[in-house]
Image (cartoon, grey):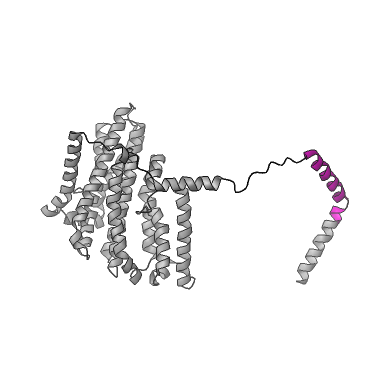
Amino acid sequence: MYLQLALCGEMLLLAGLLLRSHATGQAFDFASWQAQPIDSLSLGLLLVGLGLKAGFWPLHVWLPLAHPEAPAPASAVLSGAMLKAGVLGLWRCLPAADPTLAAWSTPMLLAGLFGAFYAAALGLCASKPKAVLAWSSVSQMGWLLMILALAWGAGAPSAALLTLLVLFGVHHGLAKGALFLAAGLAHDSRLTRGTWLVLWLPVLAIMGAPLTSGAAVKYLLKDAWHASPLAAWGVLLALASVATALLLLRALWLLRGEQRAMRRPAPRPSQWLPWALLSLAPLVLPWVWSPLREPLLAGLYPGAVWAALWPLLAALGLAALALQQGWKVPRRLRQLPNPALVASLWLTRLLRRPPLPEPNWQPDRSAWRRRERLWNRWLDRGVLAFSAWLLALLLWLGWLW
């Protein structure tokens, strides 16, 4: 499915880029594309082509299937870097301010908001830690899509929205990369208590806990949301934070279950030390990088701290209640049908089926071999002279031409 959608996405992306180049007089640079208005067809092609890379809903169908099968380092790079390439492409290939983008901003904002909740709901039904983390990435891509939509609806996107887009991408790339590496570490070795404590740092960062990079980007996102026409729907951001926290708690619970099910040796220092440094980045980076440090400090007043904490506390309360009551995901929800996978397998079988029946004719190899020898003896008589005359004729015609 990944290969099928990747090829389709590349073709759609190429078609969109060719239309942008045609609209700008055969120019093929970002500055020309950003200065030229865009039409709905080009925008749709670029959105689908780059949205498949970014994993936006409803173009996310490959992500929850690819991550559980990929090695942990590949998943870390895939979720940490490649998904952001789709967002970067949309920002660089589209004009800064355009009526078409403004008209598409509200539907894209709603799609991002729905994707954040939809992915969280399906992620809670997943039974593999990396699948839950993949659904978390789909949910976080919904947040990035909301930032893009806010920039499109603002007419001329402000520097604050561009800064927010970059900061959110860096924050999510570091934290989610650390979580996928932790999933691989937990699969291959036994995590110690100290390792579990370090593991909570990227988890709390994505949850938006105070004093982390997540708190800084969530503070900037709330400011941008309240400055938009949808300020009255700000409570949805808080509910999405609760869903994100529940999803990550589910991933930690499944990782803990894997650790109890199998006995493994403790990880070597060469394994856990690089991962620990990456896990510390969401906590250390805001203090050494001023674009993150300023919103982090601005959100340390009591009201902002409580706004960042209560979704985490609500998620912890719901998780504790689920454990106390012994709630389990129903079997039907754990085995939900996947229409995209069914369509992918059907297409694969269709393409592998030969269009015509295979021939069963068996030629007489000895007879064909005798004919070949006769032709070789006949051609060998004057083939050298014939080739020389033919070459001379071609050179003479080329000289005359």
User: Outermost residue toward the right?
Assistant: 381
Residue pictured at 19% horizontal, 58% vertical: 234
User: Outermost residue toward the left?
Assistant: 302
Q: Nearer the viewer, residue 78 or 253?
A: 253
Residue pictured at 33% horizontal, 38% vertical: 128
User: What secondary structure prevails in the magenta region?
Assistant: helix
- Left of 98 or right of it: where is 244? left
- From the top left corner, tell me how far across and down residue 185 is, in percent: 34, 35
Res. 66 image quadrant: top left
Camera sees residue 356:
yes
Q: How many marks?
A: 0
Quadrant where the C terminus is found in the figure: bottom right
- Left of 111 or right of it: where is 392? right
Camera sees residue 283:
no
- Left of 228 or right of it: where is 13? right
The vertical placement of 43 against 172, above or below, is below
**Range of the magenta residues?**
363-385
- From the top left corner, tell me how far across and down residue 290 is, in percent: 24, 56
- Left of 351 or right of it: where is 43? left
Q: Nearer the viewer, residue 70 or 179?
A: 70
- From the top left corner, tell me how far across and down residue 265 is, in percent: 34, 27
Q: Is residue 381 magenta?
A: yes
Res. 256 image quadrant: top left
- From the top left corner, tell me how far across and down residue 31 is, in percent: 40, 69
Q: Nearer the viewer, residue 112 or 282?
A: 112
